[in-house]
Amino acid sequence: MLFSGLYLVALGVGGIKGSLPSHGAEQFDENTPQGRKHRSSFFNYYIFCLACGALIAVTLVVWIEDNKGWQWGFGISTVAILSSIVIFLLGSRTYRIKVPTGSPMTTIFKVLVAAFSNSLFPKNSIGNVLDTRETPQNTTEISEEEGHGEQNTEIQTEMKDLKFIGKATVENTAYPSLHCTVKQVQDVKIVVQVVPIFMSTVMLNCCLAQLSTFSVQQAATMNTYIGALKVPPASLPIFPVIFTMILAPVYNHIIIPFARAVTKSEMGITHLQRIGMGLFLSVVAMAVAALVEMKRKRVAEQSGLMNSTEPLPITFLWVALQYLFLGSADLFSLAGLMEFFFTEAPLSMRSLTTALSWASLAMGYYLSSVIVSIVNHITGRFQQTPWLYGSNLNHYHLERFYWLMCILSGLNFFHYLLWATRYKYRSTKPDDKRDQLDNIPSEA
């Protein structure tokens, strides 16, 4: 019964986090500069609100669970969720609702299958397919809107990229159900082009996983008193939460206006620049974590407490430094990634691509477990004890692991720069022109 409830929570959270950001962003008029600025602020304050909820969770709710019982903690969470449903429904009449037009996964699967099928059984070249759009029937359809001539030239240029997917537009009489329009193919191409950006953020979330594992163990060996107040090591996540709550308004009301004034641009800081800033901060965070661990072990050696379970004479606030950098990295990358996916994705695939932000988080945590297992397996073959094994953290080689994570994060950052510098924004085009291809067929 307990696991059934936990799985239902996971299902509900997955649905909310996958759809709420895109639904909220759609409430703003993206055809005006002011609307786009407000939309950018929405993503910042969406992360801010998540931090507010986390602050309540790791302070008030944890205290109630420890002192009153777990049933009270779950009960408070249940009441809060029920209240949020009522509040959300109160605004139903004022929401801008995008009518579903079908599953984006169906479109992606159809285009990929059509491209694969046409690659195995080629009938025409991509150029011939594009030429068929100049038949009388297509000419009549295209001439219904002005400016399509320029758009058609743009399509032919874009079709040169990702030629394999472009083969989906070839007419295959043997499988008429695999008929794909140019718009469908272009939408899938856009999703494929943002995948490298998405994959580059997995390593960042792998670093974030350390906040709830080794960083908590580090703090448990240190002096956790702040004056007369004893702070439980498990409450350490409060530091990135507080940093996020402070940094989000500062970023939105100080950093962004200053960047807009300097760059004379609407965004000030582009989405990819913001993601890159988060990835760079993750490299710094891992370097700081390694230096802090070296300092912690040096204090343990000088104090003769290497084999002792007594708290070390060093404050746990040193560990808060890596929380500062990783919390800032999370704010920059997560908000930037969600806004990037939302603005760059086709209208019919915005919820899907925005949900990739959370998929990156899950993949990062899984990758963290894999890396730890690999490190222990390799180091265990060359040493008597693996780096990250044993009951005493003082005998771990955690600083080496952090340096390894720093190197991997640095390589990941350069890998990100490779794709980010080659990426061409499509959201710079007016939204009414971005989707002119909705009804353009791919063949006569």
Image: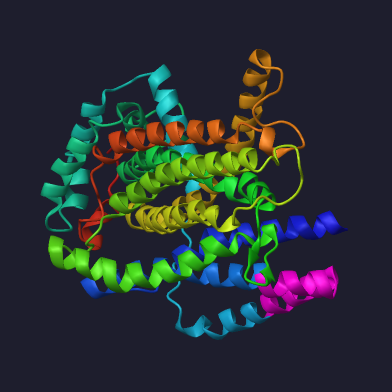
Q: Residue at x 61, y 57 (%)?
A: 14
Predominant SS along the magenta part: helix
Identify the residue at the far right of this view. Answer: 1
Q: Nearer the viewer, residue 96 or 40?
A: 40
Inspect this view and state whether residue 167 appears: yes
Left or right: 242 with respect to 426?
Answer: right
Report which quarter residue 137 is drawn in: top left
Residue 62 lies in the magenta-colored region: yes
Q: Nearer the viewer, residue 419 or 118?
A: 419
Horizontal and vertical percent position of residue 44: 40, 67
Q: Residue at x 35, y 54 (%)?
A: 340
Q: Residue at x 42, y 75 (%)?
A: 96
Q: Is residue 123 above or below residue 318?
A: above
Horizontal and vertical percent position of residue 315: 59, 57
Image quadrant for the N terminus?
bottom right
Horizontal and vertical percent position of residue 441: 30, 44
Q: Nearer the viewer, residue 106 or 142?
A: 106
Identify the residue at the far top of this view. Answer: 382
Left or right: 420 with respect to 288?
Answer: left
Q: Nearer the viewer, residue 56 or 317?
A: 317
Horizontal and vertical percent position of residue 437: 27, 51
Give the magenta part as a residue range. Answer: 59-82
